[in-house]
Amino acid sequence: MKLPDIELVSEEVHKAWMRSKKAQGISSRKSEDDEELMVPYKELSEKQKDLDRNTVKAVYAAIKKLSSK
């Protein structure tokens, strides 16, 4: 099974996270390192991008596991 590129999906995950926060009335959110997170994916640090990437990797692993049954 060929899954979409992790980087592309990670960007979409980040966009969905921002939409969710905005719907909750949150317009600014900082990381523990005081990095602004409510910015386009390309502006995030690699450390912050890794949070989205790890989410996608976990979902991909679950999809692969369930599709092999």
Image (spheres, grey):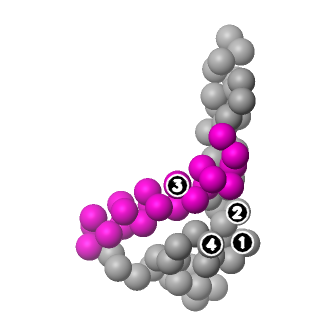
Residue that label 1 marks: 47
Residue that label 4 marks: 42
Most frequent secondary structure within the magenta stretch: helix
For the N terminus, the image quarter is: top right
Type of amino acid at the residue the image marks with label 2:
Asp
Q: Residue 68, which numbered label?
A: none
Relative image position of residue 12 (x, y in whole percent) = 52, 55
Depth-wise, is mark 3 or mark 2 nearer the camera?
3
Left or right, 64 with respect to 14, comes to right
Q: CA distance from mark 3 to mark 2?
A: 14 Å
Q: CA distance from mark 1 to mark 2?
A: 5 Å
Q: Residues within 10 Å of mark 3 (few under 14, many from 20)?
A: some
- Magenta range is 4-25
Residue that label 2 marks: 50
Residue that label 3 marks: 12
Q: Earlier in the sequence, mark 4 or mark 1?
A: 4
Residue positioned 63% across, 28% down in the render: 63
Mark 1 falls on what kind of element? helix
Type of amino acid at the residue the image marks with label 3:
Glu
Relative image position of residue 29 (x, y in whole percent) = 45, 79
For the C terminus, the image quarter is: top right
Is 24 a magenta residue?
yes
Marks 1 and 2 close (CB-CB < 8 Å): yes
| Figure check: 12 above or below 63 | below
Residue positioned 68% across, 34% down in the render: 3
Mark 3 falls on what kind of element? helix
Residue positioned 72% across, 72% down in the render: 47
Left or right, 59 with respect to 12, comes to right
Q: How many marks?
A: 4
Mark 2 falls on what kind of element? helix
